[in-house]
């Protein structure tokens, strides 16, 4: 089955640690996205990538980093510079600006 | 600048009543428009999309939406809601090379 897989489903981070969220797709989509979701804030765009080895900052990129070494993979690193990382993170892929297909999300909690 | 506005944060309707969720967008060119639904702790599922052509589009689960260029709107409707429709609904715009989401409308259903 084609789709997007995010892992892990739940992630706990200690203060000062970097953590990496995984996102893999087998839909052969060129575009991939990371969104952060907080209650009442909707989905805010962190980073997006249209092609391999290229990515752009979204609206809230500070404290996050990404890589796009393979078409299928777009991991997100939440760095220690992100002061309020507790949130629900959603990865998506699309063909251009067409419909986005979403993973099931990763819930990150700072402990 | 905000590209997608969902003016209603919460809406409550009785089961069997009709529903309309509002969405306004700001984008100079013809946008790609979407409505998604999200159950708690889950990813987003596409309800329907508009790219061009007929301005009234049909989606899954009995939903429809109408694109009105003059009003920059893409409102979601359902003639009779079911308790299982209780969820959060997001309007989105595909613009330039990314997809931007509104802040969402949480739908509550009264028995």
Image (tube, coloured by chain):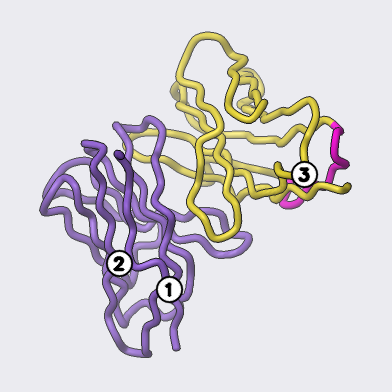
Chain colours: A purple, B yellow
Q: Is residue B49 magenta?
A: no
Residue wearing tag 1:
A108
Mark 3 nearby-residue class (10 Å; few <14, some 14–19, many ≥20): some
Q: Secondary structure at mark 1?
A: strand
CA gap between label 2 and label 1 equals 9 Å
Q: Is residue A82 left or right of residue B33?
A: left
Residue for point 26% across, 40% down: A31
Q: Position of residue A15 (x, y in %)?
A: 37, 90
Q: Residue at x 44, y 23 (%)?
A: B29
Give the residue number, with chain letter if any, for mark 3: B83
- Give the letter of the chain under mark 3: B
Q: Relative to residue A94, is residue B100 drawn left or right?
A: right
Q: Which residues are magenta?
A: B8-17
Q: Nearer the viewer, residue A3 or B95?
A: A3
Q: CA distance from mark 3 to mark 2?
A: 34 Å
Question: Which dot marks residue B12?
Answer: none
The residue beneath circle 2 is: A21
Q: Are marks 2 and 1 in contact (CB under 8 Å)?
A: yes
Instruction: Say few, some or many: other residues with alpha carbon within 10 Å of mark 1 (under 14 / 14 to 19 / 20 or more).
Output: many
Of the pair A51 and B63, the residue shown nearer to us: B63
Q: How many marks?
A: 3
Whole-percent x, y for residue B68 in the image: 63, 19
**Residue B71 occupies quadrant:** top right
């Amino acid at each position: 089955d084609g789709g997007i897989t995010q892992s892990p489903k739940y992630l706990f981070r200690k203060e000062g640690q970097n953590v990496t969220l995984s996102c893999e797709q087998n839909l052969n989509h060129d575009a991939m996205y990371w969104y952060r979701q907080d209650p009442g804030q909707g989905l805010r765009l962190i980073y997006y990538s249209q092609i391999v080895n290229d990515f752009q900052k979204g609206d809230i990129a500070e404290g996050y980093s990404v890589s796009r070494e393979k078409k299928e993979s777009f991991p997100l690193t939440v760095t220690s510079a992100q002061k309020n990382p507790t949130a629900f993170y959603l990865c998506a892929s699309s063909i251009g600006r067409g419909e986005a297909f979403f993973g099931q999300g990763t819930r990150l909690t700072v402990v | 600048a905000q590209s997608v506005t969902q003016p209603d944060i919460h809406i409550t309707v009785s089961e069997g009543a009709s529903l309309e969720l509002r969405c306004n967008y700001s984008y100079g060119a013809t946008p790609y428009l979407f409505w998604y639904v999200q159950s708690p702790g889950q990813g987003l599922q596409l309800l329907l999309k508009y790219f061009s052509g007929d301005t009234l589009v049909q989606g899954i689960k009995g939903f429809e939406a109408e694109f009105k260029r003059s009003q920059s709107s893409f409102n979601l409707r359902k003639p009779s809601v079911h308790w299982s429709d209780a969820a959060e609904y997001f309007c989105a715009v595909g613009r330039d090379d990314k997809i931007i989401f509104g802040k969402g409308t949480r739908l509550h259903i009264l028995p």
